[in-house]
Every structure is written in C-alpha cells, then in structure tokens.
C-alpha cells in the first residue's frame, strides 16, 4: 500500500541555518504519528514543510502518492490545527468553519452540510453563532479542529494543539482526539513535547533532535528498546538511571562500574555489541526497592535520600555509594531520609549504550 | 439589693451585659478601617497636579480664546485693544467674509475655494496612500519575499530624507509626466511622501498579529487578496483609524507641496489662508484673519474629536511595537 505521506531527503534552511537535514519519513494510511522532541528541534518546521507553509530548500514531499512539493497549502489535501487556535476573530464559529469551503467555491448546501456534520461530531452546535472571543479555551480548540474536519481531507496536522490548555482539559481533549482518530481513520501527524500525549495517542512516535529523527517506532518499541541514550533519557519520568562503566564481553558478558558488577547473560544484546566503555541504564519503575528487591538477580545497599509521594505510587531517590538512583515504589511506603533501603533490578530490563556514540548495544 | 447586682445571681442582668459587650466589640470593629480607602480631595499632591494642569490648559486655550472672540468682533471694537475681552456685539460678518468674500490675488471668493481644493486633494491622497501602504505593510509582514528586507530598509531611509532635497527632482518628474500644476500631480506627491511612515505603521501592526492566523488562512485556501480583505482588514480598524488621522491632518495642514506643485486656482486652504492673512494691501482685518484661521483648523480638529478613542487604541495596539 502506498504511504499516506512520504518525505524524501527533506532539507530546510533559514538563510545559513539548516534546521532540517536530509530527513526521510513515511507515514502509513490512517496512521497516527507523533513528532516528539524538545523545544527548537524543528518539529513545527517539519509540519509547516508538509503543509506547504514553508518553502523547502531541497527534497520532495508526497501526499497520497502525489508530489506536492510545489503545491499551495490549500491544494495538498491537509487540514491543520495550531497551538494558538488561530481562529478568525471577526467571524462567527460558523464563519470560521466555512471559510475554507467558501474559498474552494463549494455549493452552499454542501458547505452547510459539512459544517453541520463537523459541529455534530465535535459537539459545538450551540456555539455556531458565537464569535471566538466568547468561547473557552477548550471550545476554541474544538472549533480549530472542526476547521480541519470540514475540509474532508485525508491528512490532519496538529501543532501542539493542547499545550495552551490546563491539565484537566488537556487530558479530556486527548481522549477526544484519540476517539476522533478511531472514528475518522485518517492520517494524523501530531506535534507535541508532552511524552504522555505521545505515548497515549501514537501508533508510531518519531523522536526528533536537532532537525533529524533519532528513532521512529511504536510507543512500546521506543520505551522498551530506545535506540540511543538521548531517546532513553527523553522518554520516561523521572528519567532513566544512567551509570557509566565498562562492558566486558569476554566469557560471560558483564558490566562493571565503581562498586558494582552486573552479570548480563539475560540481556538481549544487539549484533554489534563489543567490550569497551559503556553506559548502563535502568528505568526507575524497573528498580525494586524494599522487600521486592530480594527477589531480583542484582541487589545493592542504599539509603533513602529524597521521597516524592504521588499518591498512587512514590518516587524515591536513593543513594548507593556516590551514585543517586531513582526508584518508583507502588503505594505509599513510609520512608524517611537516611533510612537504609535495599534496591534490586533485573538486568534483562536494562539498557546498554556505547559511551562513544551513545548507540544501543 | 446587693444580691441583685451580683451578675451570677441575676441571669437577666448577665445577659444584658453580654449583649452590651458584644455590641461594644462590634462597634469597635465597625469603627476600624473597612472597605475602600478614603481619598483626600485637597491633598498637597492633588493641588499640585490640578494646579499645573489648569495653568497649562489656560496657556494653550488662551490663544484659541483670543482668536474666537476676535473673530466675533467688528473692526472698531478690535481697535479698542482689549484682546481678551469678550465681544460686546457679536457679529458673524468676519466669518462670512473669510469664507466667501476675502480676496487672494485676483479671486475674491474667500476661503471656500481653498476648502474645496483641500478636500479634493486630501480625500484621494489619504485613501490612495493608506490603501497602498496597508497592502505594502501586509506584504512585508506576512509574505516574506525576496528583497523584502532591503525594500523595507530603503523605504524607512526615505522617511528621513528632508523634503526640500526632493522638491526639485519631483518638479522635474511631474513636468515630464505632464502632471505638474495639476491636482493629480499633488495627489501623487502626497501619496509618495506619506508612504514610508504609513507603511511602517501597517507593517508593525500586521507583524504584531499572530502568524498562525495567516497560516490558517493559507491552509483554508485564501490567496493574497483573500487574506488581506477577509482576515486582515476586519482586524485592523484601529490602525486604519490612526493612519487616517495621520494622513488627513498631515495632508490638510501641508503648505510646502501645496505652494510648489499647484497653480493659484488650485491652492489648498492653507496656502490661501496665508495669502489672506499676509496680503499687504488695505487694512489688516484681524477678525477676518482669525475666522479664516479657525475655519482652516476646523477639519483636523473635527477628526481628532471624532476618533480620539480609536486613535489611542490603535497607537497602543501596534504603532509603538516594533
Ligand atoms: N523564520 C525563522 N528564521 C530562522 N530560524 C528559524 C525560523 N523559524 C524557526 N527557526 C529555528 O528553527 C529551529 C526549529 O524551530 P521550530 O519552530 O521548528 O521548533 P519546534 O521543534 O517546533 O520547537 P517548539 O517545541 O518550541 O515549538 C529553531 O532553532 C528556530 O530557532
Ligand atoms: Mg513548535
């Protein structure tokens, strides 16, 4: 099946500054792709290139098999939702929804039908006669989504649509967007720097850094097998515990750092694993603390340093030697600073990265 | 009797006392500061502020007062010399004369001719220059085109070249184009010279509007003019008001271009006013001069009064931001 969107060797430079370099990406039909990355990594820029709002420096863009590299934004078959909603302030909600359709010269009956359908799907029918100024943030964002919806296109582009909303509303609308995607089944590219949004919404996540894609994969892949140290540290909260040391692949593979040695027979090595300086990573949620630690293959003694109770579970920063390790403990254990604590983990759940280039071993 | 005074033995009195202390406590609370803080009207600070304001307004209003009263007096009364005194006998004769009979050069049909000339100059000049400048500003702010920055720099630079330097080249240009001495020629001159500052005004305003709005309109398939008329214009009333005021008053008050680029029968009101006031023949008719001056200033004044609020909003909205 042909991809819904294909990007080939895309380069974009603002003057002398190259923001995107030789970027290649394919998005399948009906796929929900999330672009995730820290601020300034070029997510919006990539989205604007796909939408045709920026003239690209080099490369090609295909949408539904058609080369749209030189096409106007309105003729690419995309709908876009912006972070600041970007509703036309002088038009009513109805005017906002129908503006694009009027520009396309659609018959009046067709416009009315599409607006009515979008309003029904997004439950904004009572708001149609209002101006954007008279709407709440969540309602505005719904209208903005509606403006993309009425265009009846195959591809939706979202640029951080929820980041202006408060936490509760963000969670609600996240669910609504997911439902909308299941209902419409069109391709969506969604930019965010919220990893919860990325993990919950995406079929695949593209982690970006400095204008290139570090890893592209399903949320599970990204979480379970991060391709490099950057991805490993970016996904997960609190971030993965990282310990620098040495990997020894001689008779039995093992990792050693000051004051600890970890046997790695159960670790799934990649094909090019070799002895040498390495970084050992383990997620806080895979570090068992207290009684659970005894059942783990690797154990160490530590002392409680800092406790962050979250209600459902508790984050503990423990001090082992001169290292700090984060652990996530279920429930609400009663812990005091400086109290001794046993830590344990299973090396099969660990992540090893080569120190020189940060790639996964 | 002593028993009766004992509060423990007299429940009635005890209750009365608690009620009393309650009341006292509440009275005390009520007497403390509460609600809005009272302002003293006659503080030293207020006297300073209002005093200064009063003196300054008198300073500005006195000349206006002199002009108004003088224009309403007859010549004999003026010759008495009390320039601040209100007219003993109000007469509108000077106003009528200034408007319809005063002589400038060969014509003796008063300022009315100049007024209509000025209208015919100001209205098209203001409309054309504002339209072009707003489109310029919109293009510079939203459609980043090759050479746009250079164009803008040159335009801004143009705003700082003294007009006098460009007078002669402009005369030659207009002569070659066959527009010298015509109303059209003067309108072209006003449009061109108003361009830098008004373009700057619009560019800054459009830059201050959210960029995503423009992007959304492009995704919605609106073109250059579609976005300008349907999205940008409806949001730009304040800045258009500012531009209108700047241009109308500027062009109406212009004297230099009016003298240089037109012929006597096309002189704008300001030039005609000067010719009336400075005419050397006959007696100086102060009352007519005052009336003529007031008549000339009436249009900008009316514009300020009509749109003062919008003006302030427009200035605050975009003109200062850069
Ligand atoms: N018009 C421009 N001219 C020059 N550089 C630009 C321009 N627009 C963006 N950039 C640069 O390009 C880089 C990527 O910007 P972009 O807006 O795509 O980041 P982003 O990933 O969307 O970040 P955020 O999460 O903060 O929105 C940034 O370093 C930014 O400084
Ligand atoms: Mg962005």
Image: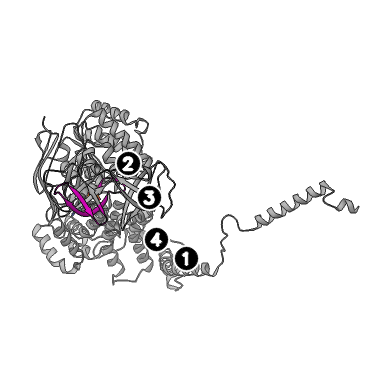
Q: Is residue B196 left or right of residue B49?
A: left
Q: Residue B113: x percent and y percent?
A: 27, 57
Q: Is the residue under label 3 in contact with that under label 1 (CB below 8 Å)?
A: no
Observer-nearest of A233 and B194: A233
Mark whose residue sits in front, 1 or 4: 1
- Name the residue beneath numbered marker 1: B87
Distance between the alpha carbons at the discs numbered 1 and 3: 101 Å
User: Mark 1 falls on what kind of element?
Assistant: loop
Q: Is residue B151 left or right of residue B300?
A: left
The magenta stretch spans which residues?
A233-260
Is residue A187 located in the magenta-colored stretch of the structure?
no
User: Mark 2 falls on what kind of element?
Assistant: helix
Have a look at marks 2 and 4 and say if they share a chain.
no
- Name the residue beneath numbered marker 3: A341
Q: Is the residue under label 2 in contact with that under label 1 (CB below 8 Å)?
A: no
Distance between the alpha carbons at the discs numbered 1 and 2: 109 Å
Observer-nearest of B36 and B72: B36
Mark whose residue sits in front, 3 or 2: 2
Label 4 neighbour load within 10 Å: few <14, some 14-19, many 20+ = some
Chain assignment, label 4: B
Q: Is residue B79 visible?
A: yes
Residue sitting at 40 percent across and 50 percent down? A307
Chain assignment, label 2: A
Distance between the alpha carbons at the discs numbered 4 and 3: 105 Å
């Amino acid at each position: 099946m042909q991809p819904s969107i294909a990007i080939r060797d895309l380069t974009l430079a603002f003057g002398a500054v190259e923001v995107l370099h030789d970027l290649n990406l394919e998005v399948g039909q009906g796929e929900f792709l999330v672009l995730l990355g820290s601020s300034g990594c070029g997510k919006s820029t990539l989205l604007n290139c796909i939408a045709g709002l920026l003239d690209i420096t080099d490369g090609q863009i295909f949408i539904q098999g058609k080369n749209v590299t030189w096409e106007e934004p309105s003729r690419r078959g995309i709908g876009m939702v912006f972070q600041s909603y970007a509703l036309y302030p002088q038009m009513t909600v109805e005017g906002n929804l129908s503006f694009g359709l009027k520009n396309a010269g659609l018959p009046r009956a067709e416009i009315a039908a599409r607006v009515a359908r979008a309003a029904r799907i997004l439950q904004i029918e009572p708001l149609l006669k209002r101006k954007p100024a008279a709407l709440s943030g969540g309602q505005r964002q719904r209208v903005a989504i509606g403006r993309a919806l009425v265009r009846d296109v195959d591809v939706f582009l979202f640029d951080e649509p929820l980041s202006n909303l408060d936490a509760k509303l963000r969670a609600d609308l996240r669910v609504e967007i997911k439902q909308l995607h299941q209902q419409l089944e069109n391709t969506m590219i969604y930019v965010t720097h919220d990893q919860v949004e990325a993990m919950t919404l995406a079929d695949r996540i593209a982690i970006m850094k400095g204008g290139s894609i570090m890893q592209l994969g399903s949320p599970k892949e990204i979480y379970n097998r991060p391709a490099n140290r950057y991805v490993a540290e970016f996904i997960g909260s609190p971030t993965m515990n990282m310990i620098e040391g040495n990997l020894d692949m001689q008779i039995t593979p093992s990792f050693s750092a000051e004051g600890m040695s970890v046997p790695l027979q159960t670790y799934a090595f990649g094909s090019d694993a070799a002895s040498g300086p390495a970084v050992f990573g383990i997620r806080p949620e895979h570090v068992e603390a207290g009684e659970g630690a005894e059942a783990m293959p690797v154990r160490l003694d530590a002392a409680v340093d800092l406790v962050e109770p979250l209600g459902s579970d508790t984050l503990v920063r423990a001090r082992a030697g001169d290292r700090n390790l984060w652990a996530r403990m279920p429930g609400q254990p009663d812990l005091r600073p400086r109290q001794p604590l046993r830590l344990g983990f299973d090396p099969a759940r660990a992540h090893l990265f080569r120190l020189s280039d940060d790639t996964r071993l | 009797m002593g028993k009766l005074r004992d509060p423990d033995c007299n429940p009635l009195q005890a209750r009365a006392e608690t009620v009393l202390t309650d009341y006292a406590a509440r009275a005390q609370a009520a007497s403390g500061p509460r609600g809005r803080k009272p302002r003293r009207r006659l503080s030293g600070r207020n006297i300073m502020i209002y005093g200064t304001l009063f003196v300054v307004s008198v300073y500005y209003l006195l000349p206006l007062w002199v002009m108004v009263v003088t224009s309403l007096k007859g010549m004999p009364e003026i010759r008495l010399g009390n320039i601040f005194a209100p007219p003993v006998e109000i007469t509108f004769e000077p106003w009528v004369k200034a408007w319809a009979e005063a002589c400038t050069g060969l014509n003796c049909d008063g300022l009315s001719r100049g007024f209509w000339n000025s209208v015919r100059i100001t209205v098209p000049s203001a409309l054309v220059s504002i339209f072009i400048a707003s489109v310029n500003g919109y293009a510079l702010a939203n459609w980043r085109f090759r050479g746009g920055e250079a164009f803008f720099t040159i335009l801004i630079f143009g705003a700082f070249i003294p007009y006098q330097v460009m007078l002669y080249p402009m005369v030659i240009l207009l002569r070659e184009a066959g527009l010298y001495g015509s109303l059209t020629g003067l309108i072209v001159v006003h449009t061109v010279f108003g361009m830098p500052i008004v373009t700057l005004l619009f560019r800054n305003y459009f830059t201050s509007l959210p960029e995503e709005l423009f992007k959304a309109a492009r995704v919605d398939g609106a073109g250059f003019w579609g976005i300008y008329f349907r999205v940008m214009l409806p949001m730009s009333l304040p800045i258009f008001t500012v531009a209108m005021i700047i241009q109308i008053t500027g062009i109406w008050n212009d004297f230099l271009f009016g003298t240089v680029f037109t012929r006597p029968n096309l002189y704008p009101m300001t030039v005609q006013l000067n010719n009336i006031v400075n005419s050397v023949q006959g007696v100086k008719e102060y009352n007519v001069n005052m009336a003529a001056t007031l008549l000339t200033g009436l249009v900008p004044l009316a514009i300020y009064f009509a749109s003062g609020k919008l003006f302030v909003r427009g200035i605050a909205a975009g003109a200062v931001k850069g």
